[in-house]
């Protein structure tokens, strides 16, 4: 379990003003105050002399009292050689940085109740490749790492559309319709296949010549549009313009099969190495 080490907050203030010079060989900081250049500063900030080890937390408080402030205020982490700030890309209040990983070096509960407001951790890089995924009968995606008996609950809505109308409205302005195997489709792209969504587009009007419409889409940039006050309709509809007419369309999400989902999640994890939230008893949650 990570140990907290308390120091007076004037050290943090000087540290933020770059008044400490770090010596990577001795792993300490020499104090220097440029506002008083003629003064001989001998103070060394040397966490290792007080038994600080890699992964421990350095906490700056008023007069160094052993009483943490709000959230992770004044809290840093020791990397074995120097002080590092907590990671703020996910939680503004700070979390364990990605260079401190769970597996070989640290157990998953190492910073529980030490880093406040979250339990974010990162796996050893090679462990992302060892996650075995399964999908149960309730479409819940689970992961396991047998080497450490880790269990991972995966929060993912690959076969669902978040806030349907907003999601479509936002994306149909970006992606024109395409033709695949003589079918009209809307393909919403993403950096990761995991997040790509493909929709089959069906034109409701039986009088339209579908083959001509397909030719038109192949040779022109056609977007789905939406209208709340469409003639003869009482709710929002989606349509395309063709031959100077508006044709209402139905939109169907093409769901991915389990093998596809699992493969795409594996590729995503290996490439992105995302953060996990640790709960208890070697159980994590992975939000993707």
Image (spheres, rainbow, N blue to C red):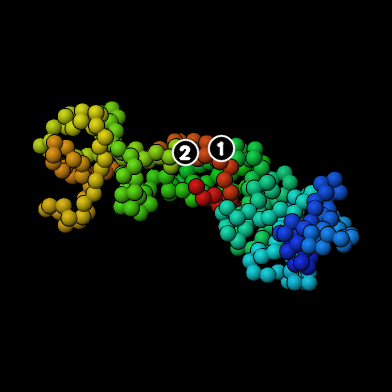
Q: Are marks 1 and 2 in contact (CB under 8 Å)?
A: yes
Q: Say left or right for 251 vs 103.
A: left
Task: Give whichever of 145, 184 is nearer the camera.
Answer: 184
Residue drawn at x 79%, y 49% is 81
The circle drawn on residue 271 is 1
On the image, which quarter does residue 209 sit in? top left
Of mark 1 and mark 2, the one earlier in the sequence is 2
Q: Say left or right for 47 vs 236.
A: right
Task: Give whichever of 158, 85 is nearer the camera.
Answer: 85
The circle drawn on residue 219 is none
- Cα gap from disc 1 to disc 2, whole angstroms: 10 Å
State the residue position of label 2: 192
Residue 222 position in % (x across, y down): 25, 37
Rate crowding at label 1 as few (under 14), some (14 to 19) or many (20 or more) other CA atoms within 10 Å.
few
Task: Give whichever of 75, 127 is nearer the camera.
Answer: 75
What secondary structure is found at the residue carrying circle 1?
helix
* Up/down of 250 relative to 15, above or below: above
């Amino acid at each position: 379990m990570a140990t907290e080490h308390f120091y007076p907050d004037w050290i943090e203030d000087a540290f933020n003003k770059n008044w400490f010079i770090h010596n990577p060989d001795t792993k300490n900081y020499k104090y220097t105050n440029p506002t008083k250049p003629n003064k001989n500063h001998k103070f060394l900030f040397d966490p290792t002399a007080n038994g600080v080890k890699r992964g421990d937390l350095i906490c700056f408080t008023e007069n160094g009292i052993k009483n943490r402030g709000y959230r992770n205020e004044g809290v840093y982490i020791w990397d074995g050689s120097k002080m590092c700030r907590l990671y703020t890309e996910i939680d503004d209040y700070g979390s364990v940085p990605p260079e401190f990983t769970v597996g070989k070096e640290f157990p998953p509960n190492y910073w529980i109740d030490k880093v406040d407001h979250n339990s974010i951790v990162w796996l050893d890089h090679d462990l992302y490749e060892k996650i075995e995924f399964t999908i149960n009968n309730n479409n819940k995606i689970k992961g396991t790492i047998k080497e450490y008996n880790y269990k991972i609950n995966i929060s993912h809505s690959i076969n669902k559309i978040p806030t349907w109308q907003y999601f479509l409205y936002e994306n149909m302005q970006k992606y024109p319709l395409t033709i695949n195997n003589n079918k009209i489709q809307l393909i919403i792209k993403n950096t990761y296949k995991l997040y790509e969504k493909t929709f089959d587009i069906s034109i409701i009007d039986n009088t339209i010549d579908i083959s001509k419409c397909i030719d038109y889409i192949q040779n022109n940039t056609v977007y789905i549009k939406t209208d709340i006050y469409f003639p003869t309709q009482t709710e929002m509809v989606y349509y395309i313009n063709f031959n100077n007419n508006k044709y209402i369309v139905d939109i169907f999400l093409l769901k991915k099969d389990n093998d596809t989902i699992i493969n795409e999640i594996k590729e995503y994890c290996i490439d992105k190495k995302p953060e996990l939230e640790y709960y208890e008893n070697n159980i994590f949650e992975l939000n993707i």
